[in-house]
Amino acid sequence: MAKKFKSNKPFFNKVKNTPKTPPTYDRELVQKGRASASEIRLNRYISNSGVCSRREADKLIEAGEIKVNGEVVTEMGYKVKPTDKVSYEGNVLKREKLVYLVLNKPKDFISTTSDPEGRKTVMDLIKNACEEQVFPVGRLDRATTGLLIFTNDGDLAKKLTHPSHKVKKIYQVTLDKPIEEEDFDKIKAGVTLEDGQAPVDDLAVTSPDGTVLGIEIHMGKNRIVRRIFEHLGYKVEKLDRVVYGELTKKDLPRGKWRFLTEKELMKLKK
């Protein structure tokens, strides 16, 4: 019999969010709280055009494969203006606008841009959102629901997914049986899985019967939340990501998406 815990209100309700209508901000790089459409580095321009990553763009620049206004540019860190014409292999590159949106993912959708088995993907849910080619940031497994961010901003995607940036993710977990107090303490202290330590930033029981918990983590290992509880003999019956960074699911129905507000974007980029 699981021991009774003191009543805990879901700590993930502390984060506030007020989703708005589609944004009116300029979807260029936002730095230091201001939107900017000024000069940007050439490698970023190339990357945003969809040719390759920024690292690969550096190699193209170094090799003299890139022209700006008809002139070969090999200088690392070179900046271009919105009016400049950047070309590669004779083709003028068109820099896409940076787009940011969030989806409340339902069950039974794969978090990939395509699936060879023909299963439903999250791209089916946002197919009419924008003309730009966006991709999901990180993954939620097929059975997991909740917040999923989409963008064509590779730098932001890297920041949100790399554990060194410690971007918080909060999940609501429903177990097949009440959590034992001993196991609760083990999880909060950090259990050791087959691929190493699984640190937990916060943990709270959010239902009177001890079967529903809120767990906050920042690491992004595959199926990490499920594996933490399975390691101690629990089956995760439901898993829902309710917070990502400063984003919440408030006023965002399951299966629906919206653009990020300027304020939300600035918080994510800090």
Image (cartoon, rainbow, N blue to C red):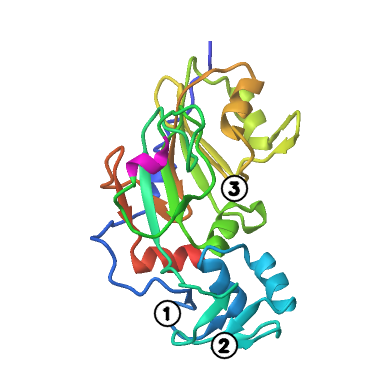
Give the percent coordinates (x, y) of residue 30: 46, 74
Q: Determine crowd level at label 3: few under 14, some 14-19, many 20+ residues with C-alpha closer than 10 A.
A: many
Describe the element under mark 2 as helix, strand or loop. Answer: loop
Residue 257: x and y in percent read 31, 48
Residue at the (62%, 40%) spot, across then down: 200
Relative placement, left or right, of 199 versus 45 is right
Label 2 vs label 1, nearer the camera: 2
- Mark 1 nearby-residue class (10 Å; few <14, some 14–19, many ≥20): few
* Left or right for 39, reference 183: left
Residue that carries the numbered disc 2 in the rendered image: 70
Q: CA distance from mark 2 to mark 3?
A: 46 Å
Name the foreground residue: 175 vs 182: 175
**Quadrant hosting residue 42:** bottom right
Of residue 72 and residue 55, the one placed in the foreground of this image is: 72
Q: How many marks?
A: 3
Q: Residue 123: x and y, percent?
A: 40, 43
Residue that mark 3 sits on = 218
Amino acid type, mark 2: Gly
Asked if residue 137 is positioned above or below residue 146 in the image, the reply reads below
Q: Residue furthest front?
A: 90
**Residue, disc 1:** 34
Disc marking residue 112: none
Q: CA distance from mark 2 to mark 1?
A: 32 Å
Residue located at (54% from left, 57% from top): 157
Q: Give the residues drawn in magenta, as a range.
A: 121-125
Task: Work out whether mark 2 precedes mark 1 in sequence or the reverse, and give the earlier one.
Answer: 1
Classify mark 2: residues with Cα within 10 Å, few (<14), some (14-19) or many (20+): few
